Image (cartoon, grey):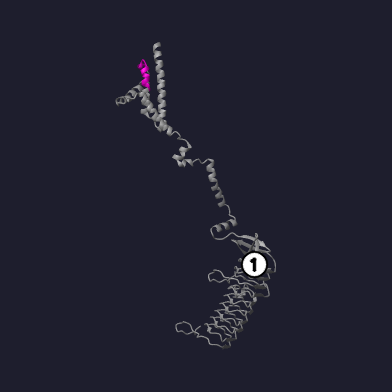
Amino acid sequence: MEKMRKQKKPAGIIFCCMLFWAVSWNALAVCADGTPEPEAVVESLTVEEAEGAAESENLSEIPNAYADILAVDSVVQEPIQTSGVDSSAEDLSKESIVLSEEPVAAEEPTNSEESVSLEDPAAAEEPVDSEESVLMEEPVAAEELVVTEEPDVDELVQLETDNGIVPAADSFESEGFVFEVSNGVAVLAGYTGSASSVTLPTSVIYGGTTYRISSVKEFAFSGCSSIKTLVIPDGITLLGKGAFKNCTSLSSITINGNIGDCHYDSADGRYYGNNSVFYNAGVNTDGLSVTFGSTVSRIPAYLFATGGAQNANDYVHMTSLDIGSGVKTIGAYAFYRCYDLNSVTLGGGLTDISSYAFANDTSLKTVRLPDSLLNIQDHAFYNCTALTDLTFGSKTASIGELCFGGCTALGTVTLPQSLTSLAKCAFKNCTGLSSITINGNIGDCHYDSADGRYYGN
């Protein structure tokens, strides 16, 4: 028995060694490609077992589990021995170890950051809780906050500037006048003063820069009831719609420069509505006088025109008009529906009166046309129902259609020798005419109707 115990002791040690090697080779095989290599493990174990078996004196006393391994090993080794390979089992084992370790060494950094970035690019961006991810998301949150907040007016204007719609303007006040500067251009935008006499400025200094003022913004002086005397100097070329609307105390207006036509893109292109430049001006005075200086060469269209009815009392309450000698042309509708206008002085340089220039001026009684006047266009004095005294100049050549139509108070007419063209209906419905004198050769009065004749309505 004692001898048997001595023989079993080395056998137990050999079994433990074999089991250790078996586990080790199996682990190496799993690390190499993720799956165990049964044949390599068995081959390696049988080689070790063969060496142990050679040293064992009594193989029969080796435990049964170990004997089973040896049995399998003998089966596996048999084809290797018959394959003609002269290498020993130990050499094959070493070669097996080298082959299995090389791929493990190459793929070892499986869990490293480099491996993640190469094999799975999405995984590199996956860590939501990292500081980098938080920093990347913060601008998005800030942008959402700006969008949800109510934008500032200046920011909106600047946004429109970026899109090419409208520039942002700097607004400032100087001596009671309000100015706006945008893209290097300054406009007169308002008035906060209380002076009774106002002369519009033509320049202003802002930020060390002198700006030329040529435009009055729409509604800039609207409702300034303190102003009684207004001077528009040379250099002001544009008056926005309603610029002096409801300046009810105006009694005197002097214009010394050439202003552009006062109209806008309405359906009919006319500007004489309740937003005309001087709408309802002078309503609280005994009369409003208007003077055009010698530096003015053209009176703009629609300047004093309104669309209000006479009984509504919301028109321009002009009573007298003095046009300087420098004026050559009166624009269309310039004094249309100035119901209170009763006195007109036309300068010696006037050559053309445009259509509807004095139409519906129902208080106008006397019109003395200068010798310089050449053409009077259609409807120029249409429906001037109070007109009784009409004198033509020595050079008037043409009178337009319905030019004096509806002038029911007109009693006598003397046409000059220079007149060569008298349009149809020029004196239509002048029901008060009792005397007509013709001093020149007037062209045939016909038009291209079906029968070529001009008599009709």
Q: Position of residue 172 (x, y in %)?
A: 65, 60
The amino acid pointed to by label 1 is: Thr
Q: Quadrant of residue 178?
A: bottom right
Q: Position of residue 303 (x, y in %)?
A: 60, 72
Label 1 belongs to which residue? 202
6 vs 90: above or below = above
Q: Main secondary structure of the magenta part?
A: helix
Residue shown at 55%/50% (left/top)? 143
Q: Position of residue 212 (x, y in %)?
A: 63, 65
Determine if the magenta segment contains residue 49. yes
Q: Is residue 248 visible?
A: no
400 vs 88: above or below = below
Q: Position of residue 186 (x, y in %)?
A: 62, 63
Determine if the magenta segment contains residue 145. no
Quarter placement of the N terminus: top left
109 vs 20: above or below = below
Front residue of this view, candidates 166 and 386: 166
Q: Is residue 36 left or right of residue 304?
A: left
Q: Quadrant of residue 428?
A: bottom right
State which region is magenta. Answer: 48-61
In the displayed image of the protein, which residue is found farthest to the top?
Answer: 2
Q: Quadrant of residue 155?
A: bottom right
